[in-house]
């Protein structure tokens, strides 16, 4: 499907979550020292540091809890709910008015709630974006949205510099925590007008709503004067209404059907999370301890660091769709690992300054940021629709749990700054970890670029039917009572009685289809084929021209992308957009 204003609106409405996450982390880091003052909350250093830990724990909890709900109740409901939870938690943090154990508990509770909201956003939004973006844009969009975290870090840094300069400390920290809710409140109204994922609707047997949702998207394309490419009927699929999956279902899928992909997703998420948390949360200590940078000047270096992280996904993102996932993901991980090893050697030799150290980090994380964002892309698109939200949540939680060890380890290695050798070893460990991630992608990577999601990971509820069998079922559905039998059925084939399921649906034996044949055709249309309007008079004539004795085509149809034109099963490339759909040929 061509790009339209709908897709741009969706990116703007959903991508703001990562901007606010970056803003939240930056603000919390900036006001930590202020909260230790007696005229604010009077926290100890360890109590102030616990604020970030509680927020991260909330993210993991929210991802796991809301990830399941995203698969159960839908993407749209969850990205509205989770955003509301974040706004509530962050806003309530600013209302911490006293000191003592009770108010401390209130502070941590509100930070935990805000974290759960953002954690839930990771699962709900990544699922929605991957399922509703055109296949040939899916990679770059997902990287762009995840990379906007660093836009939030830049906004947060600049805002705190202004707030701390013009407001008293007793008020400045409250304003900092209110920035996210104030900026994000209007986004709720924009999100309310986004449709539910047609894929999720079809999976839950809500064909009419899916047709309406895909119709809105196609209408937006037509308003931009673009044509909708045709859909080859062999690429359509039929699915049954699926039972609600649990984390037990996900684990069964991971260990029985996709063990290598589970290893890949875990490795990518763990390696990028460890490196990012280790460097990002200790960069100020490195600058102040080893390079003599003042605490007041340190945020300016963060701006350069964040700019490099933001530019990486923007510049490199299109290549993930053009060149391919495997080589770009592996390349970004391997390059950042090798570059970090070189920088570590220069650091140990004491030939870097604060400026050159920051430049080195900018170059390293220009590539590492794109690689890290691709971890979320991979964790979602290589697993089936029914467990996609839970898969993103699980691997996000695994990555965060492993990454949480980075700041403590690197803080210990920095120490009092008297021994560069210890931090040098730490940098080398980070480099090796990133190289491991690159090697995992090289050997286990999935070439998902420009392919419909269903061809990357077959839905658990799919019912594979041959094109010939599906066509005959459609003809029987449309035939008037008393009309002659199928002319196009292969000789010797026993025709089932009226109302009986077709043999072509054998792959789904024991599982009732979503609806009848006409409804199955509409389901195929909702998965990207557009509205189907078969011509009853033309179908029998067309089938009667079939070669007598020809065997039905029992080749499994390739899954159809929910928003993009189906691609040939052999390579997933888009058909010629200049072609027109064949009248009277329904998608099944």
Image (cartoon, rainbow, N blue to C red):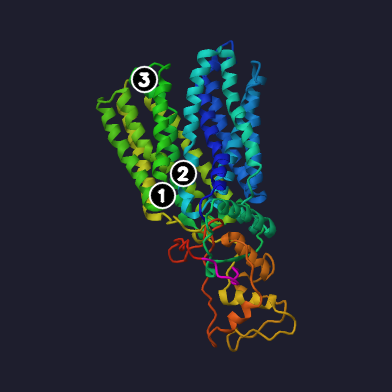
Residue 307 drawn at (x, y percent): 41, 32
Main SS type for the magenta part? loop
Q: Nearer the viewer, residue 127 or 479?
A: 479
Q: Which residue is mark 3?
A: 289
Q: Nearer the viewer, residue 78 or 151?
A: 151
Name which residue lies at 40% across and 37% down.
311
* Quadrant in the picture for the C terminus: bottom right
Using the rendered view, name the quadrant where residue 186 is placed: top right
Q: Is residue 476 above or below residue 233?
A: below
Q: Is residue 413 left or right of residue 542?
A: left
Residue 442 visible:
yes
Separation of residues labelled 3 and 1 (CA atoms): 38 Å
Foreground mark, 3 or 2, reads: 2
Q: Which residue is mark 2?
A: 143
Q: Nearer the viewer, residue 417 or 530?
A: 530
Q: Disc 1 vs disc 2: Cβ atoms closer than 8 Å?
A: yes
Q: Is residue 352 left or right of residue 75?
A: left
Judging from the image, what secondary structure is the residue with disc 2 in?
A: helix
Q: Is residue 346 above or below residue 214?
A: above
Residue found at the far right of this picture: 481
Q: Which residues are magenta?
A: 580-588
Foreground mark, 3 or 1, reads: 1
Q: Which residue is mark 1?
A: 320
Q: Nearer the viewer, residue 89 or 103?
A: 89
Label located before the other in sequence (3 or 1): 3
Q: Is residue 507 above or below residue 449?
A: below
């Amino acid at each position: 499907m061509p790009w339209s204003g709908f897709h741009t609106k969706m990116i703007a409405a959903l991508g703001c979550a990562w901007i606010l996450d970056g803003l939240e982390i930056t603000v919390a880091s900036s006001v930590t020292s202020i909260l230790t003052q007696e005229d604010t909350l009077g926290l100890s250093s360890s109590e102030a540091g616990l604020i970030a830990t509680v927020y991260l724990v909330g993210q993991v909890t929210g991802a796991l809890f809301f990830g399941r709900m995203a698969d159960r109740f839908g993407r749209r409901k969850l990205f509205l709910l989770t955003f509301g939870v974040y706004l509530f938690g962050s806003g309530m943090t600013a209302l911490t008015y006293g000191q003592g154990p009770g108010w401390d508990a209130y502070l941590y509770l509100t930070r935990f709630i805000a974290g759960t909201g953002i954690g839930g956003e990771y699962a709900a939004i990544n699922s929605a974006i991957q399922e509703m973006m055109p296949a040939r844009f899916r990679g770059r969009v997902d990287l762009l949205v995840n990379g906007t975290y660093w836009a939030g870090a830049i906004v947060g840094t600049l805002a705190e510099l202004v707030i701390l300069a013009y407001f008293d400390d007793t008020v400045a920290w409250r304003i900092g925590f209110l920035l996210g809710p104030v900026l994000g409140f209007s986004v709720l109204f924009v999100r309310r007008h986004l449709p539910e994922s047609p894929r999720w609707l079809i999976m839950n047997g809500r064909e009419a709503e899916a047709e309406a949702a895909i119709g809105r998207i196609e209408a937006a394309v037509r308003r931009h004067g673009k044509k909708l490419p045709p859909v080859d009927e062999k690429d359509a699929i039929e699915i049954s209404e699926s039972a609600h999956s649990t984390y037990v279902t996900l684990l069964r899928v991971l260990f029985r059907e996709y063990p290598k992909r589970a290893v890949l997703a875990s490795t990518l998420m763990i390696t990028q999370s460890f490196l990012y948390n280790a460097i990002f949360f200790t960069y100020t200590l490195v600058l102040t301890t080893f390079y003599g940078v003042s605490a007041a000047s340190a945020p300016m270096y963060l701006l350069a660091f964040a700019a490099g992280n933001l530019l990486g996904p923007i510049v490199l993102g299109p290549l993930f769709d053009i060149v391919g996932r495997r080589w770009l993901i592996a390349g970004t991980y391997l390059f950042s690992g090798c570059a970090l090893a070189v920088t570590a050697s220069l650091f140990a030799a004491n030939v870097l300054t604060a400026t050159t150290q920051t430049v080195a980090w900018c170059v390293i994380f220009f590539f590492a940021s794109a690689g890290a964002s691709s971890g979320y892309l991979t964790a979602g698109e290589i697993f089936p629709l029914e467990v996609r939200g839970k898969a993103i949540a699980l691997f996000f939680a695994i990555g965060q749990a492993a990454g949480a060890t980075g700041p403590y380890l690197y803080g210990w290695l920095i120490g009092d700054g008297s021994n560069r050798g210890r931090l040098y070893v730490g940098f080398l460990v980070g480099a090796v970890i990133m190289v491991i991630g690159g090697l995992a992608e090289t050997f286990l990577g999935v070439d998902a670029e420009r392919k419909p999601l269903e061809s990357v990971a077959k839905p658990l509820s799919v019912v594979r039917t041959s094109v010939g069998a599906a066509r005959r079922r459609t003809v029987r559905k449309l035939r008037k009572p008393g009309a002659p039998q199928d002319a196009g059925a292969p000789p010797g084939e026993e025709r089932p009685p009226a109302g009986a399921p077709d043999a072509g649906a054998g792959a789904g034996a024991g599982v009732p289809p979503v609806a009848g044949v006409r409804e199955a055709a509409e389901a195929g249309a909702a998965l990207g084929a557009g509205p189907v309007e078969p011509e009853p008079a033309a179908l029998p004539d067309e089938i009667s021209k079939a070669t007598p004795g020809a065997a039905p085509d029992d080749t499994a149809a390739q899954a159809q992308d929910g928003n993009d034109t189906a691609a040939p099963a052999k390579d997933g490339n888009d058909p010629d957009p200049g072609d027109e759909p064949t009248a009277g040929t329904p998608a099944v």
